[in-house]
Amino acid sequence: MIESFEALARMRTVLRDGLALLDGAEHDDPQVSVTLARIAAALDAEDDPATLRAKVADQDHDRFDDELEDLIRLNAILAAAASADRDRLVDRLKTVRESRRDLAYYGGAGGEGARCDVSG
């Protein structure tokens, strides 16, 4: 029984630590993907919640469910943060693509072999 609560505590720690790392990271920080992979691996290493709950005595099911609910909320916060980070990255990639298209357009405006100074 204690094992189940310890597993929830480990998962909660992983999620909190991951959220703290992501909260302070820049959206283009390569450590973001590494952190998310570490979080996923740590959570995958634990038993699933149904298995953990089955190991808990009947009188402790309410406590387990409350702690699991907190864990699920924390996971939702982390997922939202990761999604927002991904959206910012996608927006940045769109901006870069549009800039490259614009440069290609202006670069071709001078004709074949002509040079174009776009430095200002």
Image (cartoon, rainbow, N blue to C red):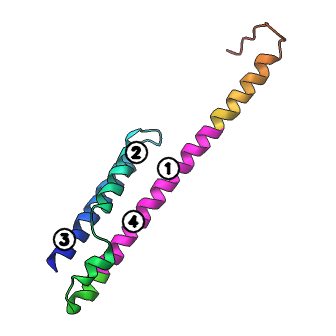
The residue depicted at 79 percent of the width and 7 percent of the height is 114
User: What amino acid type is highlighted by mark number 1?
Assistant: Asp
User: What amino acid type is highlighted by mark number 4?
Assistant: Asn
Kindly indicate the quadrant of the structure image that contains residue 112. top right
The number of numbered badges drawn on the structure is 4
Residue 70 x/y as whole percent? 34, 74
Q: Secondary structure at mark 3?
A: helix
- Mark 1 near mark 2, Cβ–Cβ under 8 Å? yes
Residue 42 x/y as whole percent? 29, 57
Residue with the mark numbered 4: 75
Considering only order in the chain, which callout, 4 or 3, is on the residue closer to the N terminus?
3
Residue with the mark numbered 3: 6
Residue with the mark numbered 2: 32
Q: Work out how far the residue at label 4 is from the one at label 1, CA to CA, in angstroms.
A: 15 Å
Q: Secondary structure at mark 2?
A: helix
Q: Secondary structure at mark 4?
A: helix
Residue with the mark numbered 1: 85
Q: Work out how far the residue at label 3 is from the one at label 4, CA to CA, in angstroms.
A: 17 Å
Q: Nearer the viewer, residue 90 or 46?
A: 46
* Crowding near the residue tagged with mark 4, few <14, some 14–19, many ≥20 C-alpha atoms within 10 Å: some
Considering only order in the chain, which callout, 1 or 4, is on the residue closer to the N terminus?
4
Say which quadrant the C terminus sits in.
top right
The residue depicted at 27 percent of the width and 81 percent of the height is 53
| Magenta residues (range) | 66-94
Q: Work out how far the residue at label 1 is from the one at label 2, CA to CA, in angstroms.
A: 9 Å
Kindly indicate the quadrant of the structure image that contains residue 108. top right
